[in-house]
Amino acid sequence: MADTIQSIGELLLHRITVTPAGPAYSYPTPAGWKSVNWAEFGAQARKLSMGLRTLGLSGGDKVAILSTTRYEWILGDFAVLAAGGVTTTIYPSSQPEECAYIINDSGTSLVLAENDEQVAKLLGVRPDLKNVKKVITFEGSSTPDGWVVTLQDVLAMGEGDNASAWADIIHTTKRTDIATIMYTSGTTGRPKGVVLLHDNWLYEGEALAEIGLLSPSDVQYLWLPLAHSFGKVLQMIQLRLGFHTAVDGRPEKLIENMPHVRPTFVASVPRVFEKVHNKIVEKAQEGGATKYKIFRWAIATGREASKCKLEGKPLGLLLSAKLAVAERLVFKAIKDKFGGRLKWFVSGSAPLSMEMASFFSGIGITILEGYGLTETSAASFVSRPESNKLGTVGPPIPGTQLRFGDDGEILIKGRGVMREYYRLPEDTAAALDKDGWLHSGDIGEVDSNGRLRITDRKKDLIKTSGGKYVSPQYIEGKFKAICPYVAQPIVHGNNRPAILMLIALDPEAIMAWASKNGIAGSFAQVASNERTRAMIAPYVDELNRGLANFESVKNFIILDRDLTSEDGDLTPSLKLKRRAVETKFQSAIDDFYKYDVAKL
């Protein structure tokens, strides 16, 4: 199949022909979950493709999608690609000005918008959207002048006996044609449009299928933002293998939906695993001192057993017996919350701390890490269950090459690598060298089995004024595993004499703690309360006991709010915008360094 499929549209035709009755997608509706098979999905995609062609879409035209993750996002994406168009992506949290920038920069002529809320953003900047002919809304209202039309209107335009014509249109697209201009959220500056070809995405599907990690019988729970490459690559491996995907982009529904969906795998970002970890620990603490002591014993036992298993060592009779008790008393109830069929989680988009990986591994929940960039079509490295090693992201996927720069920077080459940054030749030349190696901006190393370990971001490494290098992500990851009340720690100290940590607390966890301890007030008031600081301090002390003196945290500042993507603190994929946060709290940071930190 790999030699004959020339485009994502042809891969879709192949899927609906080979497994027409196979379950494709399920998604929530007001009346309950609805399911569609591949034949039904194909019929809807064909109608939408032909409707878009009726609206004037032709080969190479850009269509933006402004929506949360939902069934219609996937339908729209594949319909655009099958119609010969190019999908551009906009995060649903984007402000109107950001939407206008991406639409204009890409030359988008049609926009698929989720609802009236998203349409309102476009109406607010309509005079600036010179190229947009129509907006198609999934569940919003049309406008009297016809600039906004409904999805049902466009599907009706595509009705008719046109399967042959649709196939002819699909076959005009080639591997070397652009499929996606995916705008990176970026940790600084304006987003850049990453140009990805049909061949980039076809390669991802082929390579991930070759690994054998997934099969047609798997069930995926998909909630990740589809404007992000991590979500997009999951679409491609599904289309390649044909397994069932349950789609619900509401992250707050994740735990609630798991027992219903009963997935065999779920992909997520580290922040979600951190939130789940905090809830598990908080629930254990609520059970009282005795139950919490049993919980801590079970976690320690699980970590010990997991370490033996990962190193290929026998557990022994005593550890096996202890593990069986921990499973019965603690672990089974936790795993049942995930539906009972889960084989593994997949973590990507940002580094998962060793402590967090060890915590879940100890419970008996495998998290396989992957690594890649938008510029490499998401997946370049994936851990394998049979050779998983905590703290690594596995070996390269088949066909991807790896080497390191003189400073340890990870360089990647292969069919997954982007063609360019859209209309940014200088940025393209800075990222892609003349031999086709992409400079990732990450620092890493490989072990004797070829598994990659990411040690830090090239630009995030801290060098203290004493000349010592410190990895902020390493310290932050350890603290997240230690303190169940933290949402995001930020380690600061570049060119400074000592390390300071900013701490953003988890609103739900800290307000629950405050209520139990008789502390009233708003989140900001609770965060600034001396009792809150006194409660957090021992966790910082515990962190420092595991650190060298030069990297230990000499003091900490509790922030008066959580960090959010809406406030510009995190990217839409929940990566920390370190420089932006440090700039916002620069005054408090400077006040700390006015004192003789050696005495603190």
Image (cartoon, grey):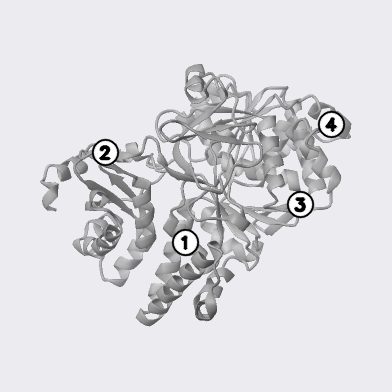
Give the mark nearest the N terminus, 4 or 3: 3
Q: Which residue is mark 3?
A: 36
Q: Residue at x 43, y 30 (%)?
A: 406
Residue 409, picture quadrant: top left
Indicate the secondary structure of the residue bearing disc 1. Answer: helix
Q: Which residue is mark 4?
A: 167
| 104 displayed left or right of 178 | left
| 376 displayed left or right of 410 | right
Q: Say which amino acid is labelled 2.
A: Asn
Between tags 3 and 1, which lies in front? 1
Label 4 and label 2: CA atoms lie apart by 57 Å
The residue lying toward the viewer, choosing from 220 and 432, is: 432
Q: Which residue is mark 1?
A: 358
Give the mark nearest the N terminus, 2 or 1: 1
Label 4 and label 3: CA atoms lie apart by 21 Å
Residue 417, picture quadrant: top right
Q: Which residue is mark 2?
A: 494
Label 1 and label 4: CA atoms lie apart by 49 Å
Between tags 4 and 2, which lies in front? 2
Position of residue 271 measured from the top left corner of the image (x, y, whole percent): 45, 52
Tags 3 and 1 in contact by the CB under 8 Å rule? no
The N terminus appears in which quarter of the rendering?
top right
Q: Residue at x 11, y 45 (%)?
A: 595
Q: Is residue 516 above or below residue 187?
A: below
Q: Residue at x 58, y 39 (%)?
A: 378
Position of residue 518 measured from the top left corner of the image (x, y, whole percent): 26, 71
Tags 4 and 2 in contact by the CB under 8 Å rule? no
Q: Is residue 393 visible?
A: yes
Tags 2 and 1 in contact by the CB under 8 Å rule? no
